[in-house]
Every structure is written in C-alpha cells, then in structure tokens.
Image (cartoon, rainbow, N blue to C red):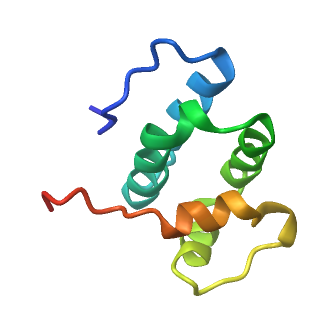
C-alpha cells in the first residue's frame, strides 16, 4: 500500500507518472510529503508547475528533505513557487 488516497483515474499519463513518483521516492518521509501534496494538487497543476515538480523529483531524497526542513538550500532552478507550496503544505493528516 502506498498511502495514496487519490485514484489516478482521469489523469493524463504525465500526471499519473508524477503521482506514482511522488509516492515512491525511496524514503517514507518524502513519500508522505510529496505524495500527500500530489494527492491534493496534481490535477490542478499547470504545465509549468508539472515541469517544476519533475525537476524537484530529480533531487535526491536527503537533499530534498533537508531543503524542505530548511537545513539546506537547493539551486534556484528547482526551488520556485511550487517548492514553496510543497514546503508550506500540511503533512499531518490529523490522524497521526
């Protein structure tokens, strides 16, 4: 079980691929952060935002997690407005 609460039904192939990649990062922490964000937002992201997400997914988990927690600064080409939205997204589901 991945933890996803969103079906990929109705998504185009690019969004399906990104949703899967967000939930299958390699570390559970990043699965939860990116996966929950993707569950909620993937259907509403613009093409430009999808490109930003694709660039973020190329960053390895330890560096991306450190950037999200504020312990590291990533290059500007991967930390646009979408990155700020991901950082601000509530990761707790209220049941934790």
Instruction: Give the quadrant of the C terminus.
Output: bottom left
Residue drawn at the location 66% of the way across and 83% of the way down: 72
Image location of residue 51, percent across then percent down = 79, 42
The residue lying toward the viewer, choosing from 36 and 46, is: 46
Q: Is residue 93 above or below residue 20?
A: below
Left-right relation of 9 to 28: right
Left-right relation of 90 to 25: left
The residue lying toward the viewer, choosing from 59 and 82, is: 82
The total of numbered circles placed on residues is 0
Image location of residue 94, percent across then percent down = 17, 60
Q: Is residue 17 above or below residue 29?
A: above
Question: Quick check: can you spot residue 45?
Answer: yes
Q: Is residue 86 above or below residue 26?
A: below
Residue occupying the far top of the picture: 10
Instruction: Give the quadrant of the N terminus.
Output: top left
Residue drawn at the location 30% of the way across and 33% of the way down: 5
Determine which quarter of the picture holds residue 35.
Answer: top left
Image location of residue 11, percent across then percent down = 56, 18
């Amino acid at each position: 079980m991945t933890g996803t609460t969103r079906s990929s039904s109705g998504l185009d192939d690019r969004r399906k691929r990104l949703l899967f990649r967000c939930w299958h990062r390699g570390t559970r922490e990043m699965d939860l952060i990116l996966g929950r964000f993707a569950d909620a937002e993937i259907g509403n992201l613009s093409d430009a935002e999808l490109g930003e997400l694709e660039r973020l997914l190329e960053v390895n988990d330890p560096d991306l997690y450190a950037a999200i927690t504020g312990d590291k600064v990533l290059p500007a080409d991967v930390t646009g407005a979408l990155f700020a939205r991901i950082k601000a997204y509530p990761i707790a589901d209220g049941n934790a």
